[in-house]
Amino acid sequence: MADRWDSALYEDRHSYVWRKGEALVELLELRPGDRVLDLGCGTGHLTAHIAAQGADVTGIDLSASMIAQARQNFPKLKFVLGDGSAFRFEEPFDRVFSNAALHWMPEADSVVASVRENLKPEGLFVLEMGAKGNIRHMLAALESVLRDGGFTPRNPWYFPSAAEYAGLLEKHGFEIAGLWTFDRPSELEHPEKGLREWLEMFAGAWFEGVPAAARNGLVFEIEARLKPVLFTEGRWWMDYRRLRVVARKL
């Protein structure tokens, strides 16, 4: 599978993704020496934040670019290249943590099964991901602009409802200890190019099969359609809606 991630762009312009996840770490209820897996660790900043709490943490990500950047950022920590829907470690973990990664893994049943297999009994699974209704304006614009241009939209994301994901966890033997859905409007870091950079960073799959010569025009049209709803006081904002869960393996 091709690695579509630009880790340099992620570090430079999209640090809000991991900065807003720092509060999620508190829900891990860490004890000194806990073994923790950071599932979808990206460039490793939250992995390092977990390690600073005294945990023995390993980061895993499917992107070679992200893993390389994580190892460069935090050379003393453990990072492995692996698939979130099919991973296996010799020793189980006390906690599995995931921030802003599971909505990139549409094989949700396999992901939850892998998490369970790699957790100790009574271990915690703490996650935050895009919820149903996440980036609804962006989704509508991508769908309509690409179809109007004669292209087939390719949506790579999985945004479940709270009930859907809770049911999946319970199916795999988890007990829901906490569950929240909430809006999180997020300001993009560049005042003029923020939306364009967001599309470059996160929406590459939508433009597969689109000739390079046509892409700029499509992006311009997406910006034009979204400006009335996502551009406020000289800044671009994303209409994020999040699902946060704490689940315990029974």
Image (cartoon, rainbow, N blue to C red):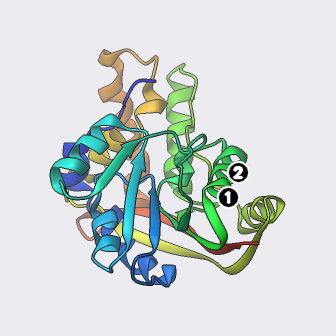
Tell me: 97 left or right of 238.
right
Q: Along the line of sight, which residue is nearer the eye, 61 or 158? A: 61
Q: Quadrant of residue 61?
A: top left
Q: Quadrant of residue 116?
A: bottom right
> Where is residue 128 shown, x and y percent of the image?
53, 67
Tell me: 48 left or right of 108.
left
Label 1: which secondary element? helix
Compared to 94, does 137 lie above or below? Answer: above
Mark 1 crowdedness (10 Å alpha carbons): few <14, some 14-19, many ≥20:
many
> Where is residue 215 shown, x and y percent of the image?
34, 25
Mark 2 crowdedness (10 Å alpha carbons): few <14, some 14-19, many ≥20:
some
Compared to 197, does 26 lie above or below? Answer: below
Q: Are marks 1 and 2 in contact (CB under 8 Å)?
A: yes
Q: Amino acid at mark 2?
A: Ala
Q: Residue at x 39, y 83 (%)?
A: 32
The image's mark for residue 113 is 2
Q: Along the line of sight, which residue is nearer the eye, 164 or 25? A: 25
Tell me: 51 left or right of 29.
left
Label 2: which secondary element? helix
- Residue at the far front: name it: 90
Compared to 16, does 183 lie above or below? Answer: below
Q: Residue at x 42, y 51 (%)?
A: 226
> Where is residue 218 shown, x and y percent of the image?
39, 30
> Where is residue 134 shown, x and y percent of the image?
56, 59
The residue labelled by disc 1 is: 116
